[in-house]
Image (tube, rainbow, N blue to C red):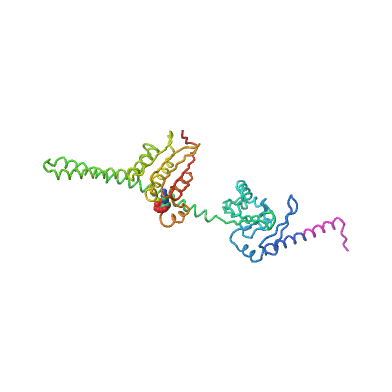
């Protein structure tokens, strides 16, 4: 007969105890998942805290477990009271190691701080933030967190319901759209350059030849043939105007003014052209730039002004336009304001992608492509403001 030493007996008892605790833990997790648990006790620094899971009916649990989004319930200090399987899959961590741990471990330092602030101040209506989830082995997943406080009946304790949406595909689509828009913008620039070249080399040259001949014709017609002389002079005038107009179109197509005279001159030219053509005065408030900005930044700002003025002419019914170019610290700030009818920018996104309306989208992409930020503020019957901010690259310094 085998006898067990008291020490071994103690060890075996410990193992049996651990087995029993593991079985209880597994059973608890199973029960939480299947919706059989209504209360969770968490041992925290302040002692044991009790959390009842409101609305823990089985049907809701099944619904949440079958969701394609991560669902979580957090305490104010970010301890995960509940998580669905989808969340565990997203962070690539077994559910039993997720529940009871801190949600903060799946976030970077910055996102952790933003979430902490939000949990302190989340309004009853909830809030949304974009985060980068830190998944196992250093991988990251872009996600959108919808947070809503869940106030306990009668008590002060607040938990938070969180729905986490995987934004990987959405980001990929945005990235693709951005790349395509960039290509369209580049192709447009190349095509404009080509057109400007053609106009200059063929149409303008031919018009100039016609102009010389019409001039000679008007000169040679005898003074006694007044009607014919006047007609020839009128023709001469029309051709002269046409040459100027073709030159203007060509200049707009390929802004050689930027290369020759710089951004401020280019912006002023565009503003003056617009004011002359439409009768809407343009106030230009431009900082004196002693150092040239990068060529792509200058071209972007120049095109943004052209596109914005096109919108003012087409949609705004404005009486005044103000264009400001300023430098705040190391950021170039460019704003175009009109006092027109305004519109609701929130309803533009879908339209812009659908029925043409490439203007505002193009403006945004141009700003982003040179590292800038695009904002639009518009109030009905007050007007619209396009605001672009572009940080200067270290090598460029504007005084
Ligand atoms: N300055 C403005 N004033 C009033 N509405 C504007 C202004 N700029 C843009 N919009 C509105 O935004 C819409 C989208 O503009 P945009 O993307 O340039 O497309 P499009 O000019 O081809 O319609 C316009 O159709 C117009 O309703
Ligand atoms: Mg437009």
Q: Residue at x 46, y 56 (%)?
A: 350
Is residue 359 among what the camera can see?
Answer: no
Q: Position of residue 247 (x, y in %)?
A: 30, 43
Q: Residue at x 70, y 57 (%)?
A: 51
Front-most of 102 and 151?
151
Determine the residue located farthest toward the bottom in the rendered image. Answer: 59
Please give left or right for residue 5 compared with residue 50 in the image: right
Determine the residue located farthest toward the left in the rendered image. Answer: 224
Please give left or right for residue 395 compared with residue 37 in the image: left
Q: Position of residue 273 (x, y in %)?
A: 34, 42
Q: Is residue 9 magenta?
A: yes
Q: Which SS does the magenta portion mostly show?
A: helix
**Quadrant that contains the N terminus:** bottom right
Front-most of 268 and 200?
268
* Quadrant in the picture for residue 287: top left
Please give left or right for residue 380 compared with residue 163 in the image: left
Q: Position of residue 339 (x, y in %)?
A: 41, 46
Range shown magenta: 1-18
Q: Is residue 238 above or below residue 24?
A: above
Q: Residue at x 86, y 55 (%)?
A: 7
Q: Residue at x 46, y 44 (%)?
A: 388
Q: Is residue 394 magenta?
A: no
């Amino acid at each position: 007969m085998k006898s067990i030493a008291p020490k071994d007996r103690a060890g075996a008892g410990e193992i049996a105890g651990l087995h029993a605790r593991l079985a209880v833990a597994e059973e608890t997790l199973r029960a939480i998942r299947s919706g059989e648990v209504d209360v969770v006790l968490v041992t925290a620094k302040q002692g044991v805290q009790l959390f009842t899971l409101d609305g823990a009916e089985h049907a809701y649990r099944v619904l949440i477990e079958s969701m394609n989004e991560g669902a979580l319930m957090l305490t104010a200090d970010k301890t995960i009271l509940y998580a669905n399987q989808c969340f565990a899959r997203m962070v690539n961590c077994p559910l039993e190691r997720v529940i009871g741990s801190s949600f903060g471990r799946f976030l970077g330092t910055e996102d952790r701080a933003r979430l902490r602030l939000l949990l302190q101040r989340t309004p009853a209506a909830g809030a949304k933030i974009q985060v980068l989830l830190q998944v196992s082995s250093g991988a990251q997943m872009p996600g959108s967190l919808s947070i809503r406080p869940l106030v306990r009946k009668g008590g002060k304790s607040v938990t938070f319901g969180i729905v986490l949406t995987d934004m990987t595909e959405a980001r990929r689509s945005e990235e693709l759209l951005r790349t395509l828009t960039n290509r369209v913008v580049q192709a447009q620039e190349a095509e404009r350059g080509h057109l400007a070249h053609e106009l200059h080399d063929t149409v303008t040259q031919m018009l100039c030849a016609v102009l010389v001949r019409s001039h000679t014709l008007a000169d040679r017609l005898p003074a006694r043939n007044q009607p014919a002389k006047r007609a020839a002079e009128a023709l001469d005038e029309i051709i002269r105007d046409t040459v100027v107009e073709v030159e203007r179109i060509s200049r707009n197509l390929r802004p050689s003014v930027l290369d020759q005279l710089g951004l401020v001159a280019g912006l002023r030219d565009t503003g003056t052209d617009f004011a002359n053509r439409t009768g809407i005065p343009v106030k230009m408030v431009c900082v004196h730039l002693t150092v040239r900005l990068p060529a792509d930044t200058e071209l972007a700002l120049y095109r943004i002004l052209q596109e914005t003025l096109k919108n003012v002419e087409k949609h705004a019914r404005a009486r005044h336009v103000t264009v400001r170019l300023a430098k705040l610290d190391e950021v170039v700030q460019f704003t175009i304001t009109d006092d027109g009818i305004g519109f609701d920018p929130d309803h533009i996104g879908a339209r812009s992608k659908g029925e043409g309306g490439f203007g505002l989208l193009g403006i945004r992409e141009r700003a982003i492509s040179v590292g800038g930020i695009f904002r639009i503020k518009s109030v009905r019957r007050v007007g619209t403001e396009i605001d672009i901010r572009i940080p200067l690259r270290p090598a460029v310094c504007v005084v």
